[in-house]
Image (tube, grey):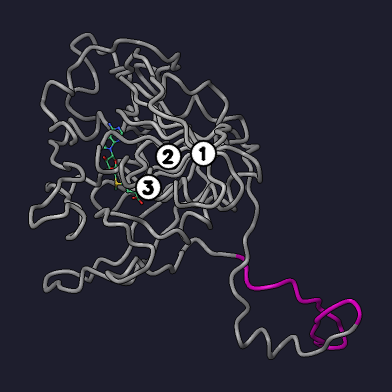
Amino acid sequence: MPRPRTAQDASEPALGAVEVAAPSDAPAGVQLVWPGKFDEAGRRRRPQTRAGRVELVRTIGQAGGNRLVHGDFRAALASVPGASVDFIYVDPPFRTDRDHFLRAGRDGGGGRQTAYGDRWDETQYLNFLDDLVALCRPVLRETGSMAVHVDYRASAHARCLLDEHFGAERFINELIWKYGLGNATASRHFLRKHDCIAVYGRSSGYYFRRQRGEVTPAQSRKYCHEDERGRYMMSYGKRYDFKGGKPLESVLDIPALAATDAQRCGYPTQKPLRLLEVLIESLCPKGGTVMDPCCGSGTTAVAAQRSGRTWIAIDESDAAIELATGRLEGERDCAFVLERAC
Ligand SMILES: C[S@@+](CC[C@H](N)C(=O)[O-])C[C@H]1O[C@@H](n2cnc3c(N)ncnc32)[C@H](O)[C@@H]1O
């Protein structure tokens, strides 16, 4: 069960395990300021690293580099070597001001099992996001990138923090995940139907492979000729070869998982595999390493596994790790180590 957050979390002293280049005490340009960011002497807070042990719980199959780590990402990240990860996806708590429970039927009885708590004051939450970005960035390779998935509650704050830690010039995309389902009632605002995913590169040489969407009926009609070189269309006497569906745009129209979807494993904020497939195929080279420091039910790890990438998935929730373990054990030829960060 996740430990409820206390005000003490926000003021805990840094124990120091990971070498993190802290942002300057007085960064140039626009920046986000919140109570607790600077101490009385004007020094900027440092990420709350935790020097701890990572213990092996069990090995599933002939484990290669795949790791499922139970614990706070601040402790677990101390065991991830610097510059070793190609792509980080993180879908942290959104500060919804409520607890999230496993879906009915997962606890074997009528009770509700907490998946994770999501009640924070603003300082606690911003310190958490600050730690997340500050501690993840150094584990990225020079060609790596990080995607932070939040909603309207924290998207502006996340962009400011990413600008500060990565540099505004490292911004790659703001992706809009248009999920369609849910949030059907609103009388004082437009229906909220999207989340924001901010993507930043470790350097300007980040990896990116363009993905194409499905071929539309209109494209099929247009490219109506075919010869030994493949399909093509003619326009004003010029030949245009068919390259496939349109390159994916920054609005990703992928339905959220319906209550009856076969992918559903009972985790309350489970994301669809298709969303992770698109991100991983675009931002992580084949054979590369994907990391998710708040992995929940393990969606990122499952998508990475299916697309031939190595993965590191971390979560502090007992329920998340139990579900992720079960999901990953059910994947064909999936080998990994289950570890505990303490
Ligand atoms: C929105 S959920 C992730 C859902 C996931 N993307 C999925 O598809 O199942 C956020 C997760 O962050 C985890 N979390 C929150 N604080 C954490 C921390 N300090 N260290 C590790 N995990 C944390 C929660 O336990 C929760 O599982």
Q: Position of residue 295 (x, y in %)?
A: 37, 42
- Quarter location, residue 214: bottom right
| Residue type at the position of mark 3 | Gly
Residue 127: image x %, image y %?
25, 28
Q: Amino acid at mark 2?
A: Asp
Name the residue: 32% across, 55% down.
270
Residue at the spot x=36%, y=34% of the render?
30
Estimate the x, y position of residue 96 in percent, counting from the top left.
Answer: 17, 49
Cβ atoms under marks 1 and 3 closer than 8 Å:
no
Disc 1 on helix, strand or loop? strand
Q: Label 3 belongs to which residue?
A: 326
Asked whether 91 or 288 is in front, the reply is 288
Number of dots carrying numbers:
3
| In the depicted structure, whether residue 248 falls above or below residue 284 | below
The C terminus lies in quadrant = top left
Q: Which of these two is toward me, 104 or 221?
A: 104
- Mark in front: 2 vs 1: 1
Three-letter amino acid code at the position of disc 1: Trp
Residue 129 position, x and y percent, is 30, 34
Nearer the N terminus, badge 2 or badge 3? 2
Dot in front, 1 or 3: 3
Q: Is residue 14 above or below residue 297?
A: above
Q: CA distance from mark 2 to mark 3?
A: 17 Å
The span shown in magenta is 228-247
Q: Secondary structure at mark 3?
A: helix
Q: Which mark is residue 311?
A: 1
As helix, strand or loop, the secondary structure at mark 2 comes to strand
Residue that numbered label 2 is attached to: 292
Neighbor class of circle 3 (other Cα within 10 Å; few <14, some 14-19, many 20+) is: some
Which residue occupies 39% across, 46% down? 298
Q: Quadrant of ligand 1?
A: top left
